[in-house]
Image (tube, rainbow, N blue to C red):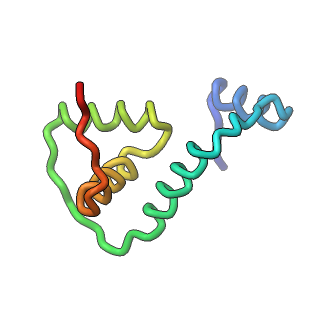
Amino acid sequence: MNILDQDEQNLLESFENEEWQSVGDAQRLQQIKSYAKATLAQDKKITLRLSSLDLEAIQTRAIEEGIPYQTLISSVLHKFVTGRLIESQD
């Protein structure tokens, strides 16, 4: 049995009461679908050592993107090897 904390219960009730609306952003939906497809298409598992600072930064960025950090890492690596990774101009 899965027990929800109060915040989780409030979110579930809000969703069940149909208080949530889609943002309707087709580009963002396509991006999320590609992340999901890449995640499901995995066929190899690796172990990777990262500095704790890098991992925390990746996890923070993944939260901002609304995806699991493993999916973000996989997406960045995929974009790099396919030549689609764009360097930031910051």
In which quarter of the view is residue 60 placed? Answer: top left
Q: Position of residue 49 (x, y in %)?
A: 15, 50
For this orientation, the residue located farthest to the bottom is 43
**Residue at x 23%, y 29% (from the top left corner):** 89
Point out the image quarter for the C terminus: top left
Among the 4 quarters of the image, the one containing residue 61? top left
Query: Camera-side residue: 89 or 56?
Result: 89
The number of discs equals: 0
Residue 77 lies left or right of residue 25; in this view the side is: left
Identified at 20% across, 36% down, the residue is 54
Residue drawn at x 20%, y 60% is 47
* Residue lying at 48% horizontally and 66% vertically, measured from the top left: 40
Answer above or below: position of 73 versus 39: above
**In the figure, is residue 4 to the left or right of 12?**
left
Q: Is residue 33 above or below residue 64?
A: below
> Where 74 falls versus 3 (above or below)?
below
Percent position of residue 24, x then y: 70, 39
User: Picture coordinates of residue 64 (x, y %)?
Assistant: 44, 31
Measuring from the top left, give residue 56's x and y in whole percent.
27, 32
